[in-house]
Amino acid sequence: MSDEESSQGDDTGGMFTTDAILNDEVEATMSDAANAALLQARKRAKLSSKRSTKSGRSSSSSSRTRPVVKLMVTSVSRSYSEPWRRKPQRESSGTGFLISWGEDTQQPIRIITNAHVVRNATTVRARASFGPHVGWSFDDAAAAAVMMKSVTDPASNGNNNVTKMLTLSTGLPKLDENVTCVGFPQGGTQISVTRGVVSRIDVDSQYVLRIQIDAAINPGNSGGPVFDEQGQVVGIASSHLRGAGNIGYIIPSKIVSNFLQMCKDNNEVKVEDRFSGLGALVVQEESIEDSKHVPGIPNLAILGSQTLESKALRHNLGLDELDILGGVRIVGSLNNNNNDSFHTGDRLDGDDVLLSINGIPIGMDGTIQLSETRPDERINFRSLVTCQRVGEFYGYATFPLRPIFTYSYIACIPFTTGSKVTLDVLRKKERKELSVSLNMSRFLVPQYDDFDAIPLYVVVGGCVFTPLSLPLVSEKKSNKSTSFSRYYRDQRSGNEQMIVLSKVLNDEVNVGYHGWKNLVLKSVNGFEPKNIQELVDVIVRKMEGEMMNFRCTVVGEQDADYVICMSEQEVIHSENRVLQRHMIASWCSMEAISKELRDEVEKNEPSETKRRNAYHTMKDMRHVLERV
């Protein structure tokens, strides 16, 4: 043995000896009560270790890890500030797991994962966690709260019985219950297993149930299953809290089951509602050409609620007279006058006091019991609503609608309502029972960049007009609160959009307006377009006179008009110059052209090549439409 190795060994042994001596000295000075408490803590630790070891042995079995797959994703994000281009391609990875689609063993197997794993995906490859590195390849991946595709085991000779499929738990796990997170996080290429306990059951910022665990969830774990001690999936790994230790979040199986059931029920929302509602979901079926959008998360159509812990406020609302101890005050409802065409049943109004939902009382702090068997755990009352389903067919909207974010056209749409809930309400000091049909939100300002959402735009004289959306606002990366935030909760009754001047591409034709941006478009030569398609229609078919006048307003200054006035001939002559300078292929996005306008162009121009070229400039479109 060398002197160096001997020295290392002596140092190590001395260190352990010192620790042992210190422990003995500390224990010798402890009181009997402290010793008893220490022994009890050690017993609990040993018992927890045994449970964890026992659970660990079963969790590591291939029956749990075998259905877990690694997803390798190639994605290309869209630019909303410059909607004619896309961002550079990027590669990422996540986790998914196999489930059977229905009770029939001959039904196809599906892969389930998180939406953000496959968002904006161009290709998705799934690699099995067992055997050789053979995978399944998916093109044009569909993103949703879950992503689902049919798969076949490459080693099963075409049979679908790859292995025992994973089972979703029907209930919520208990606090301090052991859970196991399985996935493919960063730091290695093989499957990884982490363990922890359920730390908290709460709601997120949108009042949707979520479970907090202390098992490590790292980038790459997203979409992977989280097992309980019985081997059932209690949730899907979703995210972790940055800057905090061991705080991870999973989507409960209860929420996932609702989505799966809506997919099986063949419920679908049409194009106007695909990107404006909270959590509108998508499933790709191999039997249909396009992806199917199923309804998202329901709501009570309220602006918010106020707790009633103030004695004076409770007395003013009449709660003391009726000896009512709980309840929350409704601060307002969403667009009462604009949403009647989609509304059925009763509704909540501002200043109502909501006392219970389906007979479950609401506390004055806005919480309810988590369940009858768990009375000591409480959660926000809106979780009773967001865990319900949307999707019972109700009827047809009779007014014409046009697409907002994708190339799809309909003359009328079926609209749906979800589960009905019974509300106990105190209205003007009188108790009422309301039957409210839950429905998804229809926001005026789209909330999400969905997998096939295409940013719409129109470029006229270098002025870029586009519908206002949260992805557009967030892409500006400003730390200041935006003035558009007042419109985020507004609901729409039809196919309205808020058209804004996103920016001005500087050119001689628009001198005097350089630097203008974030203005709301009110009218074009006297016409008031409701959406981007009507704006295109006005520009190519209804413009009269020598000048093009775009009247805009600043948010909060509706009475102040800012006018962009340009010569129509100068706009036409400068069009190719502006487009070429900024490498813009077309003066407007193809999805911004209505079906009626497309049909008219096709009628007047039978040549497909010339018709396709005509869409590239405003001048050519006008020329085709002017033919007799």
Image: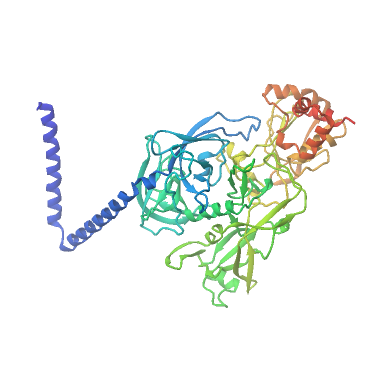
Quadrant for the N terminus, please: top left
Instruction: Report whether 503 appears left or right of 423.
Output: right
Q: How many marks?
A: 0
Instruction: Report whether 280 appears left or right of 127.
Output: right
Q: Residue furthest right?
A: 628
Residue 69 coordinates in the image, percent (x, y): 44, 40
Residue 208 seen in this snapshot: no
Residue 264 seen in this snapshot: yes
Quadrant for the C terminus, please: top right
Q: Nearer the viewer, residue 444 or 175?
A: 175
Residue 398 coordinates in the image, percent (x, y): 77, 53
Residue at image location 46% in from the left, 56% down from the top: 202
Q: Nearer the viewer, residue 518 or 378?
A: 378
Residue 410 coordinates in the image, percent (x, y): 74, 45
Q: Nearer the viewer, residue 81 or 271?
A: 271
Displayed quadrant of residue 386: bottom right
Q: Note whether 58 is above or below 438 in the view shown.
A: above
Instruction: Report whether 403 appears left or right of 118.
Output: right
Residue at image location 51% in from the left, 31% down from the top: 90
Residue 585 coordinates in the image, percent (x, y): 69, 26
- The colour style of the image is rainbow
Q: Nearer the viewer, residue 410 or 285?
A: 285
Q: Note whether 353 is above or below 104 in the view shown.
A: below
Residue at image location 38% in from the left, 39% down from the top: 191
Q: Note whether 81 is above or below 233 in the view shown.
A: above
